[in-house]
Image (tube, rainbow, N blue to C red):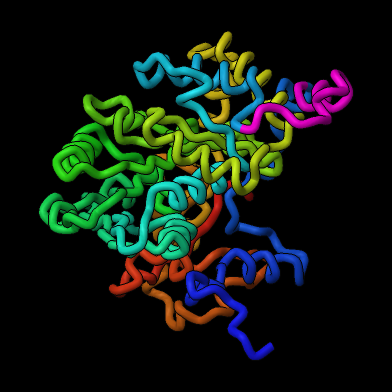
Amino acid sequence: MAKRLQARRLDGIDHNPWVEFVKLASEADVVNLGQGFPDFPPPDFALEAFQHAVSGDFMLNQYTKAFGYPPLTKILASFFGKLLGQELDPLKNVLVTVGAYGALFTAFQALVDEGDEVIIIEPFFDCYEPMTLMAGGLPVFVSLKPSPAQDGELDSSSNWQLDPMELASKFTPRTKALVLNTPNNPLGKVFSKPELELVASLCQQHDVVCIADEVYQWLVYDQYQHISIASLPGMWERTLTVGSAGKTFSATGWKVGWVLGPDRLLRHLRTVHQNSVFHCPTQAQAAVAQSFEREQLHFGQPSSYFVQLPQAVQRSRDHMVQSLQSVGLRPIVPQGSYFLIIDVSDFSEWDQPRWAKCGGLEAARGSAWPLSPREEDARLARSCGRAL
């Protein structure tokens, strides 16, 4: 055809590192150390809930409410309302999406207009930039900066912090949103309360929406604690909180996510949702609803999956850290998430693509999730603790 086929909004974003990464992983019998999914099954109660949804009520094979299966929106409102200190309306404050990815895409499409600026904290999950561009927005980057570890101590993701002056300088009259990912993918940083208060203060001062990607909130280790920025004073009104059943219950293939927020924001996301995917798979939603109902009964107890999961993954993290140290590598110990960054800058030819796949292992290069596309921080390899 003589006419241009590709929409201009797709210019420059047609490359996705995961497409190439999955292709490489399928070409040989290798251990995939890059993608954020576990190599262990979901908990028994979640699998039983899914089996019940498939074999039980035949109406679960049909459409449900466009904005979420009612038992799921109800339990999400109840469960997270307590954590956020809000009385959530299942119909107005909860939207069920096709995974957290769907929640993010819907948020960008609903709120970001042509020429709007979106602040993205580096290193960042790879979809934030193309989703901003597809909506017509302009990504504005601000980097977490490392401070030296104490002598004899391992580097930690907690040593990576925002410079308050630099962050403040990124806000302009055109700033529409800031994306906050905690625990962070790929660094594993868990933002502290003072750090969140800094972000909250600037968002309120400049009337900016916060898109809070909190899919790894249950994967926090050691003495650290996840805090939802929407729970801080004055932030519920301007925050979209994104969650994932795949990360929560170790079932990424179910593709059930959600976004929580005030009706004045969510009504616009509902417009995008109803005119795109319209509806999410009913049976998977039913299984997630039943799983959350179970967790609400066990919350905070040793029997809670949200207690057991981080303990198990932390053991894997610690084993991986020790293994890497034993061969002379320098890991950055994550406070949360599945991921582990390794400094390979002492190695010659560290930036060669062949490093991504060798010795029966495949790891994603840090340059695919740059610590800064405009700086020389891409000397870090990204590894995934799920393979342990």
Q: Is residue 276 above or below residue 366?
A: above
Q: Position of residue 50 (x, y in %)?
A: 77, 27
Q: Quadrant of the N terminus?
A: bottom right
Tell me, yes or no, whether the highlighted magenta stretch contains residue 50.
yes
Quadrant of res 46: top right
In the image, the segment drawn in magenta is: 49-66
Residue 382 coordinates in the image, percent (x, y): 49, 60
Q: Which residue shows up at 42% across the image and 76% down it? A: 347
Residue 129, position in %: x, y? Answer: 42, 62
Which residue is depicted at the point 54% across and 73% down? 7
Q: Depth check: 242 or 353 in front?
A: 242
- Does residue 375 sit above or below 327 in this rendering? below
From the viewer's perspective, is 18 left or right of 369? Answer: right
Tell me if residue 207 can be seen. yes
User: Furthest residue to the bottom?
Assistant: 2
Q: Nearer the viewer, residue 271 or 342?
A: 271
297 left or right, relative to 158: right
